[in-house]
Amino acid sequence: MTGLTIHNAIVRSPCLKWFGMLAIGALLSGCSTMRPPLNQPLNQPTSSEPSVAEYRLQNLSLNSGNSDKLVVILTFSGGGTRAAAFAYGVLNELKNTPIRRMGEATTLLDEIDVVAGVSGGSITAAYFAAFGEEIFRSFEPKFLKSEFQGGLMSRIRSLGNAVQLSSPWFGRGHLLAEQLDEDLFHGATYGDLATRRTRPFLLVTATDLTLGSGFEFSQDQFDILCSRLDKVPLAVAVAASSAVPLVLSPITARNFAKDCTQFPLAGRANPRVAATAGAYLDSEKRPYIHLVDGGLSDNLAVRWIIDNIEHSDETPRPIERNGFRDVDKLIIINVNAEQGPNMSLDRSDKTPTITDVVEAVSSASLSRRSRETREILASRMEQWREKLRRASRTDSRALSSSIDLYVIDVSLQSHPDPRLREKLQSIPTSFALAHDEVDKLVAAARTILRDSDEFGRLLREVSGQ
């Protein structure tokens, strides 16, 4: 989540200019008819456009050097630019981790099949999915070490945007999407990812404001809305996943489910999406879906994994349904850049301010939900390991019976240096970091991953083949 830091930056802006913009906005309120474009219905004619394959994991081909025997899934937590930098550090380490597969030299970066992210983590995930190794040349100057937050504040305070912001259909979340597109994604859409047809598969998650449940930017989810995903800009998905309530406005999606009688939904959606389909099928009751920060429903970006494991007894199994056919190792790397508790409050006898209280309560609530999610993931993984052990004894032909499972946690709270750990975890959740903080987060991610026992086990066993 991007927290109250952006809010504070807005509040502390020059008073006259800010109140002047508010006055103009008030005068224009209700006058602007500015409407950002929404997602399109699935059956919209596109005869003048080239056919685009649906953006689904099973439609994506292996990259050069990528082996289907080794499946690597990355999950990037929320946490603003702190999370984005920490995730970037993990990608750096994977790039610099050479392995040999089937006698060929490659790296673990080349083996990534799925990258999932929420909030700040979704920025790194989407940029990597869109531009691959270009991330190591341009992501730092364009985002991590840029004036991104300052640019966003300028947009929000700009008198030129007062008319847009006076519209009941346009808000700060849309300004975030505009800036993400101009600075990072340059018009890239899910259709562009589908046309390229290469992995990794991108999974960005927001939160359905009304239900409080996760909402995936996936064709499976958009099937339920009877809508096309290919026209959705990556910047819009990332902005929705980063739209902290009260600080940034929700991003709205249109629900066309009532028009979907000709599109069979049963069996197409993944387990979690299918389980929540009923909440969207009555589009007359819910014609619009308002989306906010994905961290509110799953700040670790692991629900997709949990839900697929819970349905691992189904036929076909989720691993086959997603297009994997010859897997011998499944690696899940969970990258968690969560803040620690703000102990500085307990070093003073002064009454905490309202901002201090709100930030502390929000952080504590988020940490509690994430802890519960980690416990669920650990429990499901252990249950799956037991299923694999049973399958290996009873059905040698089963695909899942031969899979080695690795779950690698890369968490800021695991840093071996307690002083540096506390300093990194206390970095505010915002869109602005000092350059040295970016460097420390990148180095910390690489250190924590290298020091992981499970990561060491993976490298030993891969090297032994």
Image: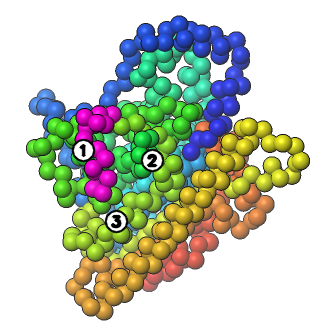
Residue type at mark 3 is Asn
Residue type at mark 1 is Leu
Q: Which residues are magenta?
A: 273-288
Please tell me which of labels 2 and 1 falls first in the chain. Answer: 2
Q: Secondary structure at mark 1?
A: loop
Residue 10 appears in the picture as rendered: yes
Residue type at mark 2 is Gly
Is 378 or 351 nearer to us in this picture? 351
Q: Is residue 283 magenta?
A: yes
Question: How far apart are the alpha carbons under marks 3 and 2?
Answer: 20 Å
Please tell me which of labels 3 and 2 falls first in the chain. Answer: 2
Q: Quadrant of residue 240?
A: top left
Image quadrant occupied by the C terminus: bottom left
Residue annotated with mark 1 = 281
**Residue located at (41% from left, 50% from top):** 214
Q: Secondary structure at mark 2?
A: loop
Q: Is residue 350 left or right of residue 92?
A: right
Residue annotated with mark 2 = 212
In the rendered image, the vertical position of residue 417 relative to residue 247, given as above or below = below
**Residue located at (43% from left, 20% from top):** 168
- Farthest front residue in view: 285
Residue annotated with mark 3 = 308
